[in-house]
Image: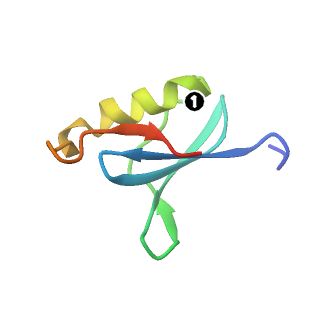
Amino acid sequence: MSEAASKTLRFNIFGMQIAVVGAPGKWSAFLLGDDGKRRPADFIVPHELAEDELCGYLADLMHESATPSNSGAYQIS
């Protein structure tokens, strides 16, 4: 995939910072640390998901991490 076709989407999912890189058909997920570093996530993002389905998928996947004070799931960029 060319750099031009690849994009990075950032999400806050119940307080966890997650980056999804790629495009439909080739997504890769990373956990973002407080130090600015990222590491590969220990889950797979289904390749068939459209960009507008990513936040909902991540929220469904991580729902056990939700707390009363941290119950939001939203796209940052």
Q: Nearer the viewer, residue 13 or 26?
A: 13
Residue 23 lies, in percent from the top left, at 69, 35
Residue at the spot x=71%, y=44% of the render? 7
Residue 17 lies, in percent from the top left, at 42, 54
Residue found at the far front of this picture: 69
Dividing the image into 4 quarters, which one contains the N terminus? top right
Residue 35 lies, in percent from the top left, at 46, 76
Residue at the spot x=56%, y=24% of the render? 52
Does residue 11 appear in this view?
Answer: yes
How many numbered discs? 1
Q: Could you say whether the residue bearing mark 1 is in a helix, strand or loop?
A: loop
**Amino acid beneath label 1:** His
Residue position for label 1? 47
Q: Is residue 19 above or below residue 23?
A: below
Q: Is residue 49 above or below residue 63?
A: above
Query: Taking 59 as reference, is 26 left or right?
Result: right
Q: Nearer the viewer, residue 46 or 33?
A: 33
In the picture, residue 24 is in which quadrant?
top right
Residue 62 lies, in percent from the top left, at 29, 40
Residue at the spot x=31%, y=29% of the render? 60
Please say which color scheme the image uses.
rainbow
Residue found at the far bottom of this picture: 35
How would you rate the neighbour count of disc 1 (Cα within 10 Å): few for under 14, some for 14-19, many for 20 or more?
A: few
Q: Nearer the viewer, residue 43 or 73?
A: 73
Query: Taking 49 as reference, is 24 left or right?
Result: right
In the picture, residue 20 is in which quadrant?
top right
Does residue 49 appear in this view?
Answer: no
Dividing the image into 4 quarters, which one contains the C terminus? top right
Residue found at the far left of this picture: 68
